[in-house]
Amino acid sequence: MILTRTPFRIPLGGGGTDLPSFYQQHGGFLFSAAIDKYMYIAINRPIVDPLVYIRYSRTEIVEHVSQIQNQLARAALEQYGIQDRIEISSMSDVPAGTGMGSSGSYLVGILKGLQALTRRGSSVQDLAEEACHIEIDLLKKPVGKQDQYLAAFGGFTIMDIDKDGKVKVSNANVSYETIEELQSKLILFYTGISRDAMSILGEQSAAAKKEESDVSKSLLQIKDIGMEIKNSIEQGNLDNFGRLMDEHWRVKKMMSNKMSDPKIDRLYALAKEKGALGGKIMGAGGGGFFVFYCPNDKKGVREAMRAEGLKEMPFRFENEGAKTMVDF
């Protein structure tokens, strides 16, 4: 039995610039932080039973790996040459389709477990790249590299992506005091809306290929804002980070009419009225989790969002990335 634990993440700056359609022209820049909400993957190799069991939001029982409908699980198993006699179960602190990077965490968690099962070691970066290769190259999903890298590395991670796709990873120079202050001033709410990120990202990816498109211009702005966000947080200037979040959300909404809607706009305006300096819908947009920066008391924002039916999700930042918790 093998059990892995892989963190989810909060994107702080540069979101969207990790799409190949963008970084192949301009290079990408991402700054994100892992949090203490996780994807758990359990892997078992039954001694006698030859079937394949894949349990997630549904249960698949098939005779051969090629019959698995879950594309991520199937591709990961094929990558390791496993054809049958395997059982994989997943549990998550956060629902899928909520902008927290669940597919990346799921895939990295499975790959981490399969490495333990087959006794194939690799570097953390190789683990992240293997997940990227499966999602982007093999499955042709319109995703970037942020989710896989944050799931693998954890912590406050900076990604500089070259035009050829090579990623330089570094740890942000953030003091313990700044981390604690930032944690105390950020607040997460689940909107109750899950969305199809692939359709939103597919549109963005197609538009980003056109250098003069509005999406490409917006992503260039988001890249610059992301670098400013990184500098502000490293310098401990968190209120400036809050203002930059607000600017980021304004630019992000310009990329697609699916990014927001009247309800999301109303909730965002209400949060600012009650004391938030900035915020955004995380991930591809359209629903999922709101994150707000509150420079003073969170009470006004908390009460207003709860009155609207949103659920708060307390969190702490997580320094560790994907890890094997059990292996026997």
Image: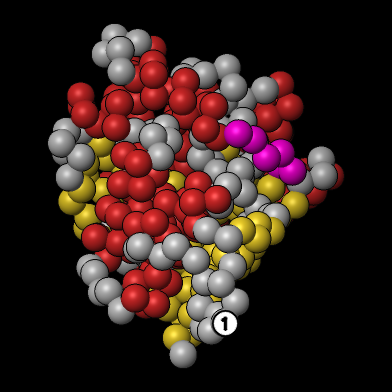
User: Could you tell me how many numbered marks the image carries?
Assistant: 1
Report x, y in % for residue 295. 54, 49
Question: Residue at position x 53%, y 26% from top?
Answer: 200
Q: Residue 218 appears at what percent x and percent y?
A: 37, 20
Horizontal relation, residue 151 to residue 1: left or right? left
Is 59 left, or right, of 183 in this rendering?
A: right
Q: Is residue 318 above or below residue 228?
A: below
**The disc labelled 1 sits on which kind of residue?**
Val
Above or below: residue 56 compared with residue 242: below
Vertical order, 142 against 48 (above or below): above
Q: Image quarter for residue 268?
A: top right
Q: Locate residue 136: give its quadrant.
A: top left
200 relative position to 18: left or right:
right
Q: Residue at x 30, y 12 (%)?
A: 210
Residue 121 visible somewhere in the drawing: yes
Queried whether the magenta region covers residue 193, the answer comes back as: yes
Tell me what residue is drawn at x 71 percent, y 21 percent. 262
Q: Quick one: 93 or 74, which is closer to the camera?
A: 74
> Which residue is under mark 1?
48
Q: Is residue 230 visible?
A: no
Where are the magenta residues, as a range?
191-196
Q: Is residue 159 above or below residue 61?
A: above
Q: Main secondary structure of the magenta part?
A: loop
Q: Secondary structure at mark 1?
A: loop
Q: Residue furthest bottom?
A: 328
Report the front residue among 64 and 283.
64
Specify how the rendered protein is coloured: secondary structure
Number of residues whose C-alpha sits closer than 10 Å to that of mark 1, classed few (under 14), some (14–19) or many (20 or more) = few
Spot occupied by residue 42 in the image (x, y as percentages of width and height): 55, 73
Instruction: Identify which residue is drawn at 55% across, 44% down.
Output: 99
What x and y, as percent, mark residue 9?
A: 47, 55
Instruction: Tell me if residue 69 is in the magenta stretch.
Output: no
